[in-house]
Amino acid sequence: MTTPTLTAATRPPVAPAHRPQKARSRWYGASVNLFYVPALLVFIVFTLYPLISGVGLSFTDWNGYSADRDWIGWANYARLAQDPTFRSVLVNTVIYGVGSTVIQQVLGLALALMLDRKARGVSAARAIVYLPVLVSPVIMGTMYYLLLQYNNGALNDVMGLFGRDPVAWLSTTNGSIAIIVLVNSLQFVGLSMIIYMAGLQGIDQAYYEASALDGATASQQFWHVTLPLLKPAVATSVILNLIGGLKLFDIIKVLTNGGPGYSTNSVSTFIGVTYFDAQSAGYASAMGVVLFLLIMAATLVLNSGFGRKRAED
């Protein structure tokens, strides 16, 4: 009996050679890493380079326009330490940051507790509260300026209908600062509300049922169940609101333009005044570095504090 000869037509197919698993995973890892390159380039061009350039300019006497710039070392920072106007502006910045943050947390949490339910009109109410977040701060500031201005302001016109004299709402330092804090808080309270609502919806109802069986009242449940479980949401909301308040710019420019005098400027607005009006770009860069360090220090302290509390819990 003869053995059949295997031809190309009758030969069984040979399985294709497979690339080793390690080589495939190495190629996949390298290809994924390439996707980071565009984001890294954007970060370097628009964040890292301007930061390094600004720090370098803070050690010069550049006026912002000429090609000449001389290295003067720490002179700009020494000038900042002795500048009473800058100290006042720095205090304003802290007030804007802390004041706005406190108001936004209180109102945001209250609104979240009220609107975290299924009822008719709740979705519309959430949208109305959040809508100002989507509006440009310049537009929001203009709206409030038209409301509060002395001549032909909507609020003074309404007061005139009742025989009341018009009020110069933005003519005093303390009043203007309070209005700026309030306007900024009302615009971005919707952001805090959304963060707190997400935190509330992530709390297991079993905690409330167990505390109710133990006889806890609604107030006790809020302080001993809701707030402790909202710590991650509180940390997120506080840090975001504080950073936004510390670098406040648009609303101040529209409402008061830093006046009366320089009394309502934040560091951000005062940087613009120093750069363009005083033509002192080196000094303005030093202010920018100080603002950056202030925001970074506040963020690190808050992150550390909230992280420590979560670890203790």
Image (cartoon, rainbow, N blue to C red):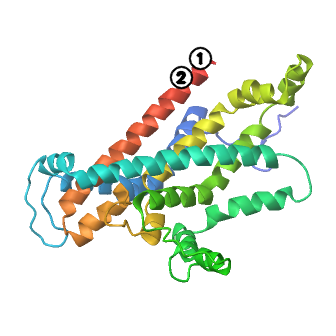
Q: Nearer the viewer, residue 306 or 223?
A: 223
Residue 68: which disc?
none
* Residue 88 in sight in this render: yes
Residue 194: x and y, percent?
70, 49
Q: Please report the residue visible at 61 percent of the width from the left and 34 percent of the height from the top.
A: 21
What is the distance, in whole Å, between disc 2 and disc 1 at their CAs? Answer: 6 Å
Q: Is residue 46 above or below residue 82?
A: below
Determine the image quadrant of residue 132: bottom right
Residue 180: x and y, percent?
50, 60
Label 2 with label 1: CB-CB less than 8 Å: yes
Q: Is residue 94 above or below residue 190?
A: above
Q: Is residue 97 left or right of residue 10?
A: left
Residue 312: which disc?
1
Residue 276: x and y, percent?
26, 71
Of helix, strand and loop, which one carries label 1?
helix
Q: Is residue 143 left or right of residue 98?
A: right
Quadrant including the C terminus: top right
Toward the front, the furthest residue is 163
Determine the image quadrant of residue 228: top right
* Residue designated by label 2: 308
Residue type, numbered disc 1? Glu
Quadrant including the N terminus: top right
Mark 2, other Cα within 10 Å: few <14 / some 14–19 / many ≥20: few
Of helix, strand and loop, which one carries label 2?
helix
Q: Is residue 201 left or right of residue 277?
A: right
Q: Please report the residue visible at 54 percent of the width from the left and 27 percent of the height from the top.
A: 307
Residue 259: x and y, percent?
36, 67
Q: Nearer the viewer, residue 138 or 51?
A: 138
